[in-house]
Image (cartoon, helix red, strand yellow):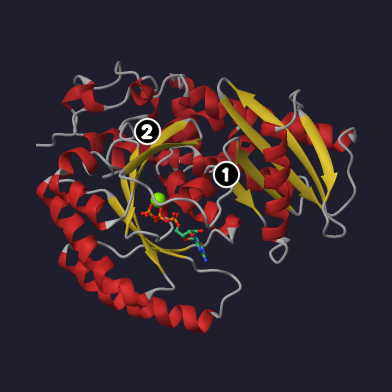
Amino acid sequence: MSNNTVSEIPDRIKSLLMDNYLEKPIYEYPREEIANFTPRSIIGIGKYYAAKLKRKAEVKTIADLANLDYTRAEELRISRKLLTKWTLSATIIYKFATSTEIPLSARRVCVAGLEAAGKTSIIKTLQNQKTTPADLPTQGVALEHLSFLGLDISVWDLGGQASFRNLYLDDPTHYLARSMLLFFVIDAQQEVLAPEAAQYLDDLLIKLKYLKETPKIFLVLHKYDPDLDKNVLNRSIDQIIEQVNPILLKHSIRQRVLRTSIYNVHGLVWYFSRIFADISPISEILSDSLAFYSQTHGLAASFLITESGFIAAEWTEQIEETRDKVFLEVMEEIRKEVYETEEKRNHFSFISQIGGIFITIDRIEFGSINLFLCSISTEPKSIDDPEMEKLHEEIRPWIFNFFSIITT
Ligand SMILES: Nc1nc2c(ncn2[C@@H]2O[C@H](COP(=O)(O)OP(=O)(O)OP(=O)(O)O)[C@@H](O)[C@H]2O)c(=O)[nH]1
Ligand SMILES: [Mg+2]
């Protein structure tokens, strides 16, 4: 029935599974049925532990295991490290089995929209580069790269001048096919351009339908600048949505709207981080671990940031109002560390310009993946503080564990 046979499973997922405990060869199962496999089919879970999980926590399938709270390790008398690893494996398999997304291997995204909507500026901001109003319009397509938690994402920046738009529409197989996500960028301050933007979106969606492609579509209402009157902006956005909504409806596409500005870097990076996290199998579990880590150690906030500046996980319970400022300071320090410091430091700390906030940053390296763990505290802590040492000793192996799974 299903054309999603197991042979299409990426090696990364196959390598987590054993087929000795199945009634028939793995490739004969429909993809969604993998979620119902016994936990024993996960590599590393033997008979003894499978029985224990069943008896003590009613875990009978991979789906059950994916939903098991791994902080119950002590109560279940299973080592925390093992249980974390198994629930993570189960989560990755479960997500794969139940997702209707384009496979993880397709990591191409398109950014389209009218000229001067701000597409190139958004991409540059995500790449941690400065943009200036004097930057030139994109001539045709510019191919860019973003990296998120070990995923290499290639970004097609489709220059928006009318002559180029026609080029893409004339050859959609080349310009639009095999994309996982399509960001359609609209200048939120220019409601007069909305009919033209809506027309272009319609043209693109018609071509995608013809190609039988269903990338996730995001409307990026850009130039939503923080210093502008929100009433005026929102009124303009309402008018834009009014033009665009019928097009989405016509193509039965769910409305997903982002409001971004290059003058709100945290907001922009955060939005895109969430979207990319959605296509990364490990982001959710990283967030859970970070929350656990932060609460255990009484932190005010914490970020886990990738070398390229994306937020892999964030926990900011106690510093809601100053979060954006702190985030920008953190990003600036990381940028300096990555691009300007000659020798790599394993950790460093600094005091925020906002009074009473102390930040330490840890570099966590795993193969080619570099992460920065930022611990934000309201009490002065030095990097030589034994408390901090303890903290780092704890989180490192966790993160290490995650990456050992996704990269093997
Ligand atoms: N106020 C404001 N201006 C922005 C923002 N983002 C980009 N701009 C400005 O908008 C203009 C166009 O930006 P680009 O990024 O070149 O636009 P583009 O969509 O790539 O344009 P094409 O390459 O021609 O398709 C530039 O002057 C940018 O500085 C924003 O968030 N707010
Ligand atoms: Mg451009």
Identify the image quadrant of the N terminus. Answer: top left
Task: Tell me the amino acid under the disc marked 1.
Answer: Gln
The residue indicated by pointer 1 is 129
Residue occupying image coordinates x 46% and y 47%: 123
Asked whether 288 or 362 is in front, the reply is 362
Give 332 or 357, whichever is nearer the viewer.
332
Q: Is residue 60 in view from this perspective? A: no
Q: Secondary structure at mark 2?
A: helix
Residue 93 — which label? 2
Residue at the image position 23 percent from the left and 66 percent from the top: 248
Residue 379 point in image, percent of width and height: 88, 52
Q: Is residue 111 above or below residue 1?
A: below
The residue type indicated by label 2 comes to: Ile
Dot 1, crowdedness within 10 Å: few (<14), some or many (≥20)?
Answer: few
User: Residue 112's x, y, as percent?
Assistant: 32, 53
Q: Quadrant for residue 77, please give it.
A: top right
Q: Position of residue 99 (x, y in %)?
A: 30, 43
Judged left or right of residue 9, residue 344 is: right
Q: Residue at x 83, y 32 (%)?
A: 389
Residue 296: x and y in percent read 74, 46
- Above or below, 128 against 166 in this view is above
